[in-house]
Amino acid sequence: MTPLVISLDELKGQIGQEMAVTDWLPVTQQRIAQFADATGDLQWIHLDTERAAKESPYGCTIAHGFLTLSLLSQFMKQALEVPGLRMTINYGLNRVRFPAPVKAGAKLRARFTLLSLQEVDGGAEAAYQVTLETEGVEKPCCVAEWIVRYYAS
């Protein structure tokens, strides 16, 4: 997908609006294993496909919640581009929930809605409601309020 290119000034008019829906991204077992290696979270429910098939309530391995959350940056790159900035900073999260698991092999996409935009010294702070959806699943796998700071050139 081509990102929506929008200036900081134009962003002000988007408060309360869904701004972008990304393409689907597969969450493979390999990606889950790499995340486990990087973070040291080696729980069997993420890595042991045979045990997960027998013992997990999901019938297979599932992605880490933090893996799902970490995909926000990749999805944002697909969704929005604010030109003319010196830098963009992940300022944090106000609220995160994981209402449904992400099964290995599932495809995810993100929906971005701008909740607020306020001036800060040298730039602006945007709060986005990000909803991560799993293809074919009614309940979202992650809902987060993400704070991003944009600093002008």
Image (spheres, rainbow, N blue to C red):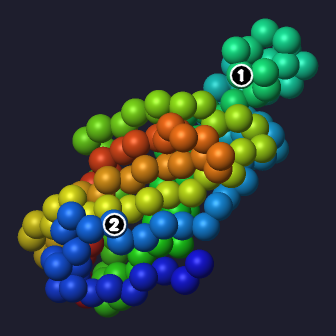
Amino acid type at image mark 1: Tyr
Measure the alpha-carbon separation of dots 1 and 2. Answer: 31 Å
Query: What residue is at 54 percent from the left and 31 percent from the top?
Result: 100
Query: What residue is at 72 percent from the left and 54 percent from the top?
Result: 26
Task: Determine the residue located farthest toward the top in the rendered image.
Answer: 55
Q: Quadrant of the N terminus?
A: bottom right
Query: What residue is at 22 percent from the left and 74 percent from the top?
Result: 14
Name the one closer to the observer, 95 or 153: 95
**Percent coordinates x, y for residue 144 in the rendering:** 36, 44
Where disc 1 sits, the SS reads loop
Specify the label residue 58 is tagged with.
1
Mark 2 nearby-residue class (10 Å; few <14, some 14–19, many ≥20): some
In the image, residue 108 sits, relative to residue 1, either above or below, namely above
Amino acid type at image mark 2: Glu
Q: Which residue is mark 2?
A: 18
Q: Is residue 89 left or right of residue 99?
A: left
Label 2 near label 1: C-beta < 8 Å?
no
Q: Quadrant of the C terminus?
A: bottom left
Q: Is residue 139 left or right of residue 4?
A: right
**Percent coordinates x, y for residue 120 in the rendering:** 10, 67
Query: What residue is at 64 percent from the left and 26 percent from the top?
Result: 41
**Percent coordinates x, y for residue 24 in the rendering:** 65, 61
